[in-house]
Image (cartoon, grey):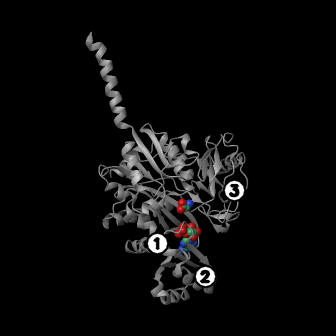
Amino acid sequence: MEFHTELPALRQLFLTLMTNTLRMNILIIGSGGREHALAWKLAQSPECSTLFIAPGNAGTPSVGINLDIKTHEFNRIAGAIRDLGIGLLVIGPEQPLADGLTDFLHAEAGLKDLLIVGPGRLGAQLESSKDFAKAFMLRHGIPTAAYLSVNADTLDKGLQFLQGMRAPYVLKADGLAAGKGVIITESFQEAADTLRDMLGGRFGKASATVVIEEFLKGVELSVFALTDGISYCLLPEAKDYKRIGEGDTGPNTGGMGSVSPVPFARKDFMRKVEQRIVEPTVQGLAREGIPYKGFLFFGLMNVQGEPYVIEYNVRMGDPETQSVMPRITSDLVPLLCAAARAELAGHTLEISPSHALTIVLASGGYPDAFEKGFPIMGLEEATEALVFQAGTAPDDEGKAFTAGGRVLSVTALAPNAAEARAHAYAAAGLIQFENSYMRPDLGLDLITGDLPIS
Ligand code: AMP
Ligand code: GLY
């Protein structure tokens, strides 16, 4: 008799123990639309127990718990990881990666084996130093634009190199410059003046070295991989819309919208991307003894069907993540854990054939000066789409106010690009705040066939 009563109880205990060992607390570092989209995806995992976001935004409490810790507060992040029993850490933005958050945490007592998605300082140089990235590509035969790196001592060589090039001229600050460190100009004189200006400190230390680059004419594409430094898994590709104005006009921004999939990212093109770019990058890191567990973002230019690397980022893109995450149908948590454990080989990702289109709602004036602190209305009405918040902050009652340039993004999924576009604009139209701005032409190039097919 006793057996009959005890057995289910034992089984229950066993199941509870199993479930608890499979489930883990997860912490995401960051506060943007990218982090909200990641949080939305990870919170759906049966393997996620409690999800925390530090610091998060006014939208992330819908899927997790915000921690009032800034991304540069490494000691407080370590404390929270210990106090909350975090099993998996995902680092969203580039700055803490470049500043060595991963190395810092792994050197902390008791955190040596913490699962972290995000490379250490060495690997993060692929983004934090354009000079490093260009030299890396050269060493591994990865296609990229011809270039010369110069500093104040080699200005003359830089001017000579510029003279030997044709317009437009591309100048890039070596270091992180909040997405503003690339200057493209048509006039040689302006390029020469800009070079002097940058080396003179226009972007502070970030432009003490400047990369002068050949201009590549083509269409851009963002390719994402998750890697453990040995194997990799491709995520859905995306394209973002960088300029502020309709028809790709006006200044560059962090990104005003995104689409996924991208029509020209067909099998043959993607095979070239993998063989010429993704594989040699992962192998190059391994060969140079640079451990890398995290996302790798390849900013590519399709030049008449041939892929070239414009830039590496060591994180997911924003607002690309908002279009990419909804297209991933399989659980991402086991994959992230496998990457962090260097056991990614053999893992795959299921991807929906649906089309995603993301519209960024920005504060009027962005990317220059803008006002903030306006209440955001209509969030509850935009139920036909996914709303990922970014530059928002909650008031005492948790209501969202504008608190940044890119305020939020609206993503719609549909069987084709035209429907995704229509749904996303319909939903975005329901959300209002003073001085809001969105580009009216996102995704039109897909529908009108302005994008090359291959
Ligand atoms: P990055 O910050 O490196 O992504 O550069 C910002 C933007 O400048 C890119 O998204 C491209 O639109 C443009 N760009 C950068 N490098 C080049 C290049 N070599 N040729 C043409 N456009 C470029
Ligand atoms: N959308 C481009 C980036 O995240 O850098």
Q: Residue at x 41, y 38 (%)?
A: 47
Of the pair 283 and 113, the residue shown nearer to us:
113
Q: For residue 263, which quarter of the picture?
A: bottom right
The residue to which callout 3 is attached is 438
**Which numbered mark, 2 or 3, is in the foreground of this view?**
3
Q: Can residue 315 be spotted in the picture? A: yes
Q: Is residue 184 above or below residue 158?
A: above
User: What's the distance in space between the residues labelled 2 and 3, CA to CA?
Assistant: 31 Å
Of mark 1 and mark 3, the one earlier in the sequence is: 1
User: What's the distance in space between the residues labelled 2 and 1, CA to CA?
Assistant: 21 Å
The residue to which callout 1 is attached is 130
Q: Looking at numbered disc 1 in the image, what kind of residue is underneath it?
A: Lys
Image location of residue 332, percent across then percent down: 45, 45
Quadrant of the frame with the C terminus: bottom right
Q: Residue at x 43, y 39 (%)?
A: 48
Mark 1 residue CB less than 8 A from any atom of ligand 1: yes
Characterize the local packing of mark 3: few (<14), some (14-19) or many (20 or more) Cα atoms within 10 angstroms.
Answer: many
Q: Residue at x 49, y 73 (%)?
A: 206
Q: Looking at numbered disc 3 in the image, what kind of residue is underneath it?
A: Met
Of the pair 8 and 404, the residue shown nearer to us:
404
